[in-house]
Image (cartoon, grey):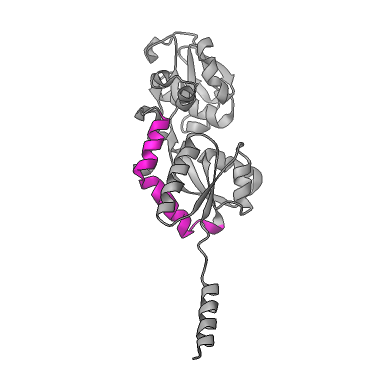
Amino acid sequence: MSIHSTWLAAVLIALALPVAAGIRVGVTPGALADSIEVAATEAKTQGLDVEVVEFSDWTTPNLALENGDLDLNYFQHQAFLDNALKETGYHLRSVALGILPNIGLYSEKYQSLDAIPEGARVAIASDPVNQGRGLALLETAGLIGLTPGIGWQATLDDVTANHRGLRFVEIEGPQLVRAIADVDLAQGYPAYYVNAGRADFAGSALIYSGLGDRHFAIRFVTRDDNAADPEVAAFIRLYQSSPAVRARIDAANAHDPKLYSLPWLD
């Protein structure tokens, strides 16, 4: 074979080989984005190029993934994804678990669940998904009873036992952190208190959710057609095994293990 023929064959083979283009990961700003950035930096040292794309809303990350502008997103729990798929018909799926942000029941007036009085005012999320999660925690706390088996899908109509006559106040999730002063007990998100400079209070809930709440773990989500992408799988493995990522998650949660869970370890 001539030198020219050898060169031409080499070029043709090179053109036929797949190019490792890296992956693009969609996130929302905050602790989730920070942990993904740590993983992306570490991935680069291992030869995997990861571009992190931040979105300021909870709609566009799924649209961008469906359209092929992303390879992976990391911002939503399974309940949110299920609802999005029902509304849009997108071809997306959860492929792995990420961090599980716990929720708690908080009070500025009482130091224990036993102290919650008759007729207490209880703030709870107004949206169906997060309201169900809060009601399930209230049931776990022994303060109410729910329709058997309803779990996180409960609404206020599913409250079957309320022996203390609790009065529920429905409030938008992000506003629950401000409602705490006006009620006796409130469903709360520890991360909101941490971000508001109240890390000590974030760690003072009367009860927290935990691994039993894994339906609300943040999910790594792909399209159906790239769910087995080896680069996506490699990045997820790195995220889940990296000490640096775990340290960043812990720092974002005020170094308090009550505030979060890592369900992929269970």
Residue 127 in sight from this viewpoint: yes
User: What x and y, as percent, mark residue 229?
Assistant: 49, 59
When asked about the image quadrant of residue 114, the answer is top left
- The quarter of the picture where the C terminus appears is top left
For the point 51% across and 71% down, the residue is 17
- Total marks placed: 0
Between 170 and 142, the one nearer to me in the picture: 170
Dominant secondary structure of the residues highlighted in magenta in the image = helix
What's the magenta region? Answer: 225-253
Residue 261 in sight from this viewpoint: no
149 falls in the magenta region: no
Between 68 and 207, the one nearer to me in the picture: 68
| 218 w.r.t. 224: above or below | above
User: What x and y, as percent, mark residue 254?
Assistant: 39, 27
For the point 54% across and 86% down, the residue is 4
Residue that sits furthest to the front in the current view: 3
| 25 w.r.t. 250: above or below | below
| 75 w.r.t. 194: above or below | below
For the point 44% across and 20% down, the residue is 105
240 falls in the magenta region: yes
User: What x and y, as percent, mark residue 164?
Assistant: 46, 12
Between 19 and 190, the one nearer to me in the picture: 19
| 23 w.r.t. 55: above or below | below
User: What x and y, as percent, mark residue 231?
Assistant: 46, 57
Between 200 and 215, the one nearer to me in the picture: 200
When asked about the image quadrant of residue 61, the answer is top right
